[in-house]
Amino acid sequence: MTQRSEQLVLDYLSEVGLALYGRVTARERTAYLSSLRARIDERREAEGDDVDTVRRVLRGFGSPEHIVQEELTGRAVDLEDDEMIPPKPRHADRPAPPWRGGPNQGFMSLLEGPSQTDLRMDGRVARKPGVTRNSLMLVRHHAPEAVALVMLVLTGVWWDVAFLWVLGAALVLLSQVWSTLDKWVGVGLPLLACVVGTALWTGEAKFVDQYIQQALPATGVPALALTSLACVVYLFPKAARAARVADRAARS
């Protein structure tokens, strides 16, 4: 391993990290860069470690922007012929209807199985994990986040166990997967909805404690529950993406 070839790899990884900045969480970025470094080292061991060979290996992976685009979208980009491909008509990107093999956009998409398929530009079929497979990977790699989401769902569909929201909120705040903004959304919005719902109660009570005792279960808890379900819809894709990155890093 020469110092010059190692510096080329470090510069390349640095540019990939910059391209990933702001698009994924810090944990996801670290996991992906570690996986990419391992793949580069495997190619160097197989093909050689001189400067020209390392340059060729890095060119094979593609430019940092293209490799990040492929990672985020799941689509392979032909770096040499990309500009030669004629523009497609606008309707070409429109997905086929479900009865012709296209994805189901409604509620049934949650039950459509472990994955969907998508035709890549190189002719191979790339598989997109569905909700079921994402959930399994989330349980495997980020169990606390999976438990937090289950707590929020139970709060949303079964108001009698609204106390579980406190446990779910604690797990959200302690999470290393969700960002600070995600935590504010996942915990702050349900609390705000609960306060507003309690304040909008139209009943009558002589004392403040009586008002809270009657308004909280009447309007506060329902507002908390419904907002918790909305937060699950917001938090689940982010946690699932982190689980996919961790799963890919574990298999590499």
Image (cartoon, rainbow, N blue to C red):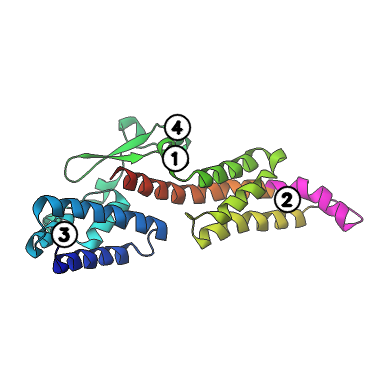
Residue, disc 4 = 111
Estimate how packed mark 2 is, as few (under 14), some (14 to 19) or many (20 or more) residues with alpha carbons within 10 Å: many
Which of discs 2 and 3 lies nearer the camera? The answer is 3
Q: Amino acid at mark 2?
A: Gly
Quadrant containing the C terminus is top left
Q: Gap in Å between the C-alphas at discs 2 and 1?
A: 34 Å
Q: Amino acid at mark 3?
A: Leu
Counting the numbered discs, the total is: 4
Location of residue 204 with respect to 26 vertically, above or below: above
Circle number at residue 58: 3
Q: Gap in Å between the C-alphas at discs 4 and 2?
A: 32 Å
Estimate how packed mark 4 is, as few (under 14), some (14 to 19) or many (20 or more) residues with alpha carbons within 10 Å: few
Q: Gap in Å between the C-alphas at discs 4 and 1?
A: 20 Å
- Secondary structure, mark 2, is helix
Asked whether the beta carbons under mark 2 and mark 1 sit within 8 Å of each other, the answer is: no
N-term-proximal mark, 4 vs 2: 4
- Secondary structure, mark 3, is helix
Circle number at residue 220: 2
For this view, does 153 lie left or right of residue 118?
right
Displayed quadrant of residue 153: top right
What residue is rendered at 45% in x and 32% in y?
Answer: 111
Circle number at residue 150: none
Q: Which residues are magenta?
A: 202-222
N-term-proximal mark, 3 vs 4: 3
- Secondary structure, mark 4, is helix
Q: Amino acid at mark 1?
A: Arg
N-term-proximal mark, 4 vs 1: 4
